[in-house]
Image: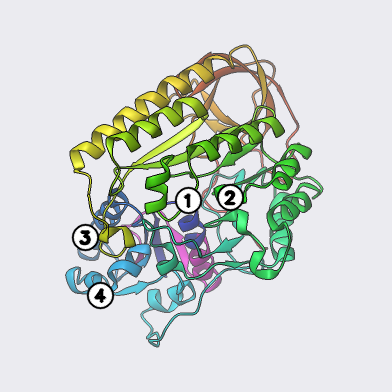
Amino acid sequence: MKIGFVSLGCPKNLVDSEVMMGALEARGHELVSDPDEAEALVVNTCSFIDPAKQESIETILEMAEYKKSGKAQRLVVAGCLVERYRDELRQQIPEVDAVVGTNELQDIVAHCEGRTVADGKAQPYLYHDLTFRRLASPRHMAYIKINEGCDHPCTFCLIPQFRGSFRSRRFESVVREASHLFRSGIREINLIGQDTTAYGEDLGIKNGLPSLLDRLARIEGAGWIRFLYAYPNRVTQRLLDTIAEHRTICGYIDIPLQHSSADVLKRMKRGASGDVFLKMIERIRRTIPDVGIRTTFIVGFPGETEDDFNQLCRFVEAAEFEHVGVFGYSDDEHIASYHLDNKVPPGVIYRRKRRLMAIQRKISRRRNQALVGKRFRILVKGPSAESDLLWEGRLETQAEEIDGTTYIVDVEGEMPRPGDFGEIRITRAGDYDLFGKLESVEPTPESLPAETVAPTWLPVLQ
């Protein structure tokens, strides 16, 4: 059977999609990129914020049209939207033939084939190193999910309801998968989970994430290793020392702080304050020279006063983050904050979001301009979609998709290949992106094919 697959949302969703695609191929089905050719269609949805929910619904409706005009006989909807609106999807979009929750990934084959799946409460799911999956990330990089679920009580979040309580993968399972990926030619591995800094706590592993990073950094032929989604009170000195010790571990911390006002953080059930965060940031920068720090904030949370927001603005100006994402609060009847009083009007949320991003834009421009003339290691991604005259890549302080891009405007010597590491001298800086001359290239391992365009799929296990 030919199956078309659409994956929406964050890297955690992408890994779920890769697991489902791997299961379908292992069964003998063919993945196709043209929905007109597909006999079954799968949409893996996201619903963390309102725009993501709207995109998911629009994509489902778009794919439903192919049941009328194309070859598609079945439409399967998977992911977070299913957890929130399982019954509504079936009732309001009759073209949907089956739904797959976040803990039901193993049922994807049966649903695509039209077989009956027994009803019952799904058990918490987390793939392992023997799970066949297809990488849908760029050819030179991959994500590894090291844990799943969450035990934090954040009032704005539904993840514990969707994905269950926190659980970690076995230490050696992660090491084996990472080793295989590096041997396959992957140059960068991104460790992900709802809270990667809690890795191993449920398994009784002390200093779980630092220990894992140290072990992965010692894999022969290891490229870059990056972890995403740290929790503030788990950024230990041992973790920072481990990052600083190894050249292969990216000097990059992704740590969603959500706010800086103690009152707002208390209503979010996260704790701490801007002063506490500033001390942590100073400790990070003291330990890891030239570190890149990314964070995210929610503006317009119920009860956020003008003074709370002004505190956040002053905090962002003082912290001078390399990268910041700002989200307007999305109210939802399924989350605990829905029942909080003093809701902030949508117009105010919009203005606050624009103001905070304007502050960060100036900071980002100033920090980027300070990099002009300096040299950095770069991972070459390949030709740019912006122009045939440009190639692009990333510094270790830039994560895939969420941060700015470093554009290669000139090359000294031979042209690089996607997946090459090299050294670039920054010649110009924009608000978020950098531009430079590639002055040298490190040889690419023979296991990574010489290609100018990254293929869509790569088998994780042979």
| Amino acid on which the number 2 mark rests in the picture | Asn
Examine the image and state in which quarter residue 198 appears. Answer: bottom right
Residues shaded magenta = 18-42
Nearest to N terminus: mark 4 or mark 2: 4
Q: Is residue 439 left or right of residue 435?
A: right
Q: Please give the residue where the numbered disc 2 appears in the rendered image.
A: 233
The dot on residue 41 is none
Which mark is nearer the camera, 2 or 1? Answer: 1
Q: CA distance from mark 1 to mark 4?
A: 36 Å
Q: Residue at left 49%, top 20%? A: 389
Numbered disc 3: secondary structure: loop
Do the residues bearing badges 3 and 1 touch, measured as CB atoms within 8 Å? no
The dot on residue 87 is 4
Q: Please give the residue where the numbered disc 3 appears in the rendered image.
A: 65
List x then y, in percent, for residue 138.
Answer: 54, 44
Q: CA distance from mark 4 to mark 2?
A: 38 Å
Q: Is residue 372 left or right of residue 207?
A: left
Above or below — where is 90 with respect to 251?
A: below
Do the residues bearing badges 2 and 1 touch, measured as CB atoms within 8 Å? yes
Q: Residue at left 28%, top 40%? A: 305
Which mark is nearer the camera, 3 or 1? Answer: 1
